[in-house]
Image (cartoon, grey):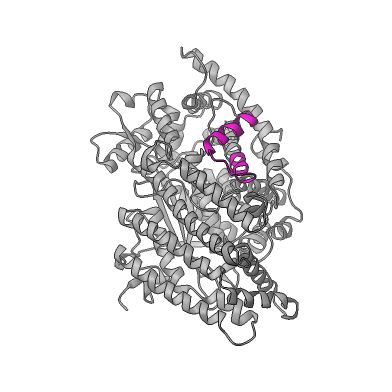
Amino acid sequence: MTNPLLQDWQTPFDIAPFDRISDDDFAPALEEALTAHNAEIAAIAENPDPADFANTIEALESAGRALDKVLGVFFTVAGADSTPAREKLQRDFSPKLAAHFSEISANKALFARVAEVWEKRDDLDLTDEQARVLMLTHRGFVRAGAALDGQEAARMKEIKGRLAVLGTQFTQNLLADERNWYMELTEDDLTGLPDFVVDAARAAGEEKGVDGPVVTLSRSLIVPFLQFSPRRDLRERAFRAWEARGAGGGETDNRAIAAEILALREERAKLLGYETFATYKLETEMAKTPQAVRDLLMEVWTPAKTQAEADAEVLTGMMHADGVNGDLAPWDWRYYAEKRRAAEHDLDEAAMKPYFQLDRMIDAAFDCANRLFGLEFAPLDVPLYHPDCRAWDVTRNGEHVAVFIGDYFARGSKRSGAWCSAMRGQAKFPKEQRPVVINVCNFAKSDPALLSYDDACTLFHEFGHALHQMLSDVTYESVSGTSVARDFVELPSQLYEHWLEVPEVLAEFATHARTGEPMPRDMLDKVLAAGTFDMGFQTVEYVASALVDLAFHDGTAPADPMARQAEILTEIGMPEAIRMRHATPQFAHVFSGDGYSSGYYSYMWSEVMDADAFEAFEEAGGAFDPHTAAALERHILSSGGSRDAAELYTAFRGRLPGVEALLRGRGLIAA
């Protein structure tokens, strides 16, 4: 067996041997892994012995290891270092994988055995985690359509296959639009831009093969350009390109794809007996119902909109004072908000940014994890999939805990955004395995690499997800790490952002890139005081996206999603100068797969908990209180999905939270 993807890896901690893997290895490895998985499934389904937890549920947990191995590597490189060859493989793999897993969920003999174990569950003397895994397995089969027959079963399979194709196409179209557009800048166009934006624009020009600086559609470059460029014409051009992603007509237009996805999701839900896709999707989340989600979002929307409208008046006045008549436009907001922040908080981002070096922020995230959970991080010298990547051996008390990989810089081959994934999850069955966890970001590359405060928050956010994976301590991989309800998965990540706001953390790690001096105390105070600045804008653009997502799925699927989007924004009174954070043609969270469909609200749901959870540390005496940290690890970070999310949070905090801590934290009500 010469295919490295199918071999036992003789590497440190069984990390994938990226230096030996080529794109030519993926397709044959996938075929062999699918064949092996089919054989494993057939053996479980055709087992002549009576079904029990070991020979059915645990057997399913053991099956597909080769497939997990192949896909763990493939989806890592496909998302973070795409090539035309990998994009074609992804288009080929998506329907094949959808058909494969549809066949498993439609396997009547297999489902009969799962149902048999489920029916006699009270007599099996299962542990709490085993009972949870059994419930999730049985529920997963039912929700996948295992109980359907005949034409309905066949149609469900068709729908899943088509959705897989459409989700891949949506993602690749968006990546193509982001990769292909850039705006060249003359030296005169650089006037007024701080050095860090100029450096990033020059680096982006080099990456694009252009002789000179450019603005790209990478968020880490276009947002600071919109903040600092005094050229309103250039801001408008860049913003309109940003807004047009996935909606420019031609082969990369996502609007018809979004409409088809929504229609297929509705049909899928109705095949399973649900009135709407949102009802189906939210049944397994903490929120449970579309109305509960809507109530939360509107409770936040009202004060956020009031704040944003008041801010818009101030910014409009500033614009008019500059001699620009007319209404405040979306390409004006960030520019005048930045000028207002500098004036009201005496905070200059260009002066502040040298204190947020990427390497020092990584050190800060690691140091907080050490103080809270005793983790230590040692660099690993291993081949990875891109030269920008780096790896660490994570230990505690000398014992290996995980491998952590960081891939931080934007490039044309990487999809936008930031994410955490596990190439291998933690488990103890069928044997002990420690996780390999990756954080992927899109920070502008420079030397030294400097972050905005928002970038630093993103780094801490994704590392919070990584801690959820690394500190997992369960038996079965299907409930390890971030395998939790979608509206619970953002709790550890958003909670970890709070440690960046701790004054002693900034005092130690926010050091100047050139001088090494710590951030002056008055600047540090200003950074923290400005923490809720422009929060009306940020909350409005997010909540609007969440409300559109919910409305798309809670009712008849719109034939024209863009028209429906406009209706929803009119209904809620969307301020004219603010756009949704993710308009429909760019809404990869919702349309690249089912993960966040009807679930974009989950960041806000989790924020209700993270604001309340950090108050637990403050009530206990400080951000590094050891007893609260131990309770956080025991009840949440180590437990994965082994218990119901509400139970886990209640075990940690003693109760479920209200929305007040969130509104206080965002400065939308008085503290």
Residue closer to the observer: 185 or 567:
567
Q: Position of residue 525 (x, y in %)?
A: 57, 35
The answer to whether 243 is drawn above or below residue 432 in the figure is: above
Whether residue 354 sits left or right of residue 639 in the image: it is left
Whether residue 152 sits left or right of residue 6 in the image: it is right
Kindly tell me whether residue 317 is visible in this rendering.
yes
The answer to whether 286 is drawn above or below residue 49 in the figure is: above
Q: Position of residue 452 (x, y in %)?
A: 46, 39
For the C terminus, which image quadrant?
top right
Is the magenta region chiefly helix, strand or loop?
Answer: helix
Q: Position of residue 333 (x, y in %)?
A: 51, 26
Q: Position of residue 585 (x, y in %)?
A: 47, 40
**Residue 550 painted magenta:** yes
Whether residue 120 sits left or right of residue 6 in the image: it is right
Whether residue 363 sits left or right of residue 412 in the image: it is right
**Residue 491 painted magenta:** no
The quadrant in which residue 427 appears is bottom right
The answer to whether 339 is drawn above or below residue 481 in the figure is: above
Total marks shown come to 0
Residue stretch in magenta: 546-573
Kindly tell me whether residue 510 is visible in this rendering.
no
Q: Residue at x 45, y 34 (%)?
A: 243
For the N terminus, which image quadrant?
bottom left
The quadrant in which residue 387 appears is bottom left
